Image (tube, coloured by chain):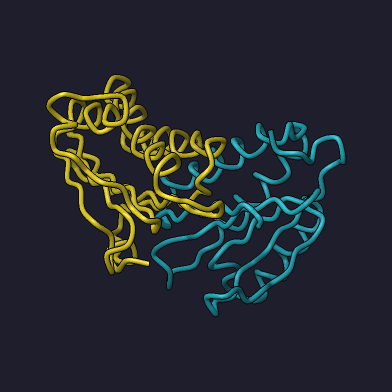
Amino acid sequence: MTDVLELTVPNEHRFLPLARLMLGGLASQFDLPYEQLDDLQLAVEAVLAEESPAESHVTLRIEAIGDTVAVSIHPGFGDQSEGFALERVLATLVDTVTTVTLEDGKQWLRLELHLTPSNSEIR
Amino acid sequence: MSSAREEVSSSTVSLTIPAKPEFLFFCRLALVGLARAERIDPETLSDLKLVVTEACSNVIRHAYAEPGGRVFVRFDLEEDSLAVEVTDDGHGFQIDPSDFLEPREVGMGLAIIQALTDELELSVGNGGQGTVVRFRKRF
């Protein structure tokens, strides 16, 4: 069974650093190189910076599957045209950007980052 | 899970972690983030880290007979306090009130939580499953 960590925070600027801290914690578990951590944090923050007025809270679902760290975010993109631009930015920071429907029936934006083999074992 | 966890206020932060010791520090990280958001003083933050660690450790050690369990932590940030609810959906554990008065090894966690917080409440989870530990620490 995959270990999943889920964080839900108010969609307010002052709470968003919590996401950065969680990703930092995950990076320390995996000995993730600083550059990869920085890319992942930047990608998540870019998504969180998008306006999503319909939702009062943002949820991050973080999981490690083999040599991949996946961060699913709900809500994902807001406006579709902005979402397209954001997706192009994200593609430079993480390996895979997809929109998935999880078991809760909601659409999540999923970011995947592949780790190097020596860094993929949780301590 | 319980409806209480689904009712979120504007300053509610929820964290779900696997019931494994190596994930405990994410709860402490969440508190650090909350302390930055609300300027919680270092001494209060230190107390909160200890009590949240104790409450979550109880779940990890006692709540689940099988692997795969989860720890649900909910932080409600209010003007003058932080309310924390730690929940599991395991088989629960027996709470002996005397643990608070004469703490033994097993009851030390609850005694520590009571000593360092302003309110403590223990209950059985929704549907009689699991345990809910709620406490509040004033700033």
| Residue B41 x/y as whole percent | 29, 24
| Residue B8 x/y as whole percent | 31, 62
Q: Is residue A115 above or below residue A91?
A: above
The answer to which quarter of the image holds residue A89 is bottom right
Colour chain B is painted in: yellow
Q: Residue at x 65, y 69 (%)?
A: A82
Q: Residue at x 24, y 41 (%)?
A: B82
The answer to which quarter of the image holds residue A71 is bottom right
Residue furthest top in the image = B43
Q: Is residue B37 left or right of residue B65?
A: left
Q: Nearer the viewer, residue A21 or B27?
A: B27
Q: Residue at x 67, y 75 (%)?
A: A81
| Residue A34 x/y as whole percent | 74, 31
Q: Residue at x 61, y 42 (%)?
A: A23
Q: Nearer the viewer, residue A53 or B63?
A: B63
Q: Is residue A93 above or below residue B48?
A: below
